[in-house]
Amino acid sequence: MWKQFLSKLPRTKSTRDGGGGDSGQCSGGGNGNPIQRTSSVPAGGGGRSASTIKRMSSAVFPSSVVAGIEPLVAFKDVPGSERHNLFVSKLGLCCAVFDFSDPAKSSAEKDIKRQTLLDLIDFVDSSSGRFPEAVIAACSRMLAVNLFRVFPPSYRSGAGSSSGGGGEGDEDEPMFDPAWCHLQLVYELLLKFIGSNSLDAKIGKKYFDHSFIVRLLNLLDSEDPRERDSLKTILHRIYGKFMVHRPFIRKAVSNIFYHFVFETQRHNGIAELLEVFGSVISGFALPLKEEHKIFLWRVLIPLHKPKSVGVYLQQLTYCVTQFLEKDPKLAGSIIIGLLRYWPVTNSQKEVMFLSEIEEILEATSMVEFQKCMVPLFRRIAHCINSSHFQVAERALFMWNNDHIISLVAQNRQVIMPIIVPALEQNGQNHWNHAVLNLTANVMKMFSEMDEELFSACLTKCKEDEENQASMEEKRRLKWAKLESAAALQPVTGHTAVLVG
């Protein structure tokens, strides 16, 4: 339809050249160049008068698109009583969606729409009175038409999404949407419209409803990091503006997390959602509601399970520590939860888990520490003996933390018998010199902490080694006797024979 109307548009050099470089085409890359805002009416562009522009827009945009008032007129050129009508008219014009895969296609229409979007943003930014319901309805419709779309399948093989890759160092280059030069303006309009004091939340909640929010959340799976960053800010603004929608938003986001953890393990926007919820959690009232604790147990702790946890671990750890700041009594159960999802074969994840455990222990009280110290330090002992030097090194670095040393010192009667055998084994068998040096330092620290207990643990460790060696020798002799006895028995019938 646009091509038919475009044929009636008078062509001038300024139109073909894009008005000095702005032809509605997107700039390459993801540099986020600042938008150069200009008026929707060119100032002396090709010597056009206002009447010429009016005739042009009437030809290009029919009455079905432009309702009641000329959309290319500037807001300053109409009386105050007509500005909301002009706003609705411009919104109707912006409901046209273009194909940006070909930058040269419909360039004039793209430029008109872009300038109109800039006008709308400026109007919302400077508006002082309340928006009528017709304006809110028209705005929500235009936003839905431009933003809500189905993403094409990812071309990347295997774990193609940024949160579905194999770990923290996902090497895939980000995908940039060619339509971003227009989408960015639409997102900016949405952000300013939601945040405007002119928007009455009681009216706005009818149009920015549950359906709108769900479709907005679905856009967070975009592969364009610029779009996800805009959505993150907008979601936070919606959560703050419409209090009535807060429980629904929390439930909808929880469902996205469930789907990611237990079904697909593929989603591009997990880090952004967690970043939003970090701020949400910090605003929870005390005492914490049961709903919020369930979110911790059923969502945040299981989010440690996917192999791509490194992509969003920073945001996830922040959310967990926010819960700890709200209620320090959660520390013991959080650590037990992390131990349940502890990685066995992924050394990179193990290093990440040790870092998070240290951060959690810094906020853990003595009472909560005693609830989980035995299983925790059994796991740390396994990490100390890891043949992967980074895991062993990270576990030994925990003794550089003064708060952890204080907790260990006050519970040394329980912890030292668990850790000292692992240190002794490291000192005898580990291949890495850095790990050997750290092991010697920790053993020296334990010796200075309680020399008598440390000596007793070493003695017990040597006794256990001797007993283990004795048991292995007895087992070997038993098997040798069985093999000798079996060798003396003749092979008859269908007797099974062990071939060596």
Image (spheres, grey):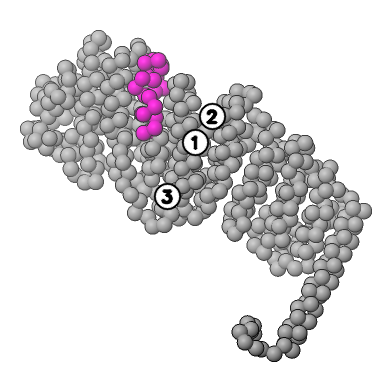
Q: Nearer the viewer, residue 158 or 16?
A: 158
Q: Mark 2 points at which residue?
A: 280
- Whether residue 135 is situated above or below residue 25 in the rendered picture: above
Give percent across and percent down for residue 63: 13, 23
- Whole-angstrom CA distance, mark 1 to mark 3, is 19 Å
Q: How many residues crowd mark 3 within 10 Å: few (<14), some (14–19), many (20+)? A: many
Horizontally, residue 436 falls left or right of residue 212, namely right
Instruction: Name the residue tied to disc 1.
Output: 254
Which region shows up in magenta?
194-216
Relative height, residue 93 to residue 268 (above, below): above
The residue located at (18%, 43%) in the rendering is 105
Which residue is located at x 80 percent, y 59 percent? 421
Where residue 393 sits in the image (x, y, percent)? 69, 57
User: How dense is the environment of label 1, judged by Cα within 10 Å: few (below 14), some, or many (20 and up)?
Assistant: some
Q: Which of marks 1 and 3 is in front?
A: 1
Kindly state the secondary structure of the residue where label 2 is placed. Answer: helix
Residue behind mark 3:
161
Tell me which secondary structure the magenta stretch mostly adopts.
helix
Q: Residue furthest left?
A: 8
Q: Is residue 342 left or right of residue 23?
A: right
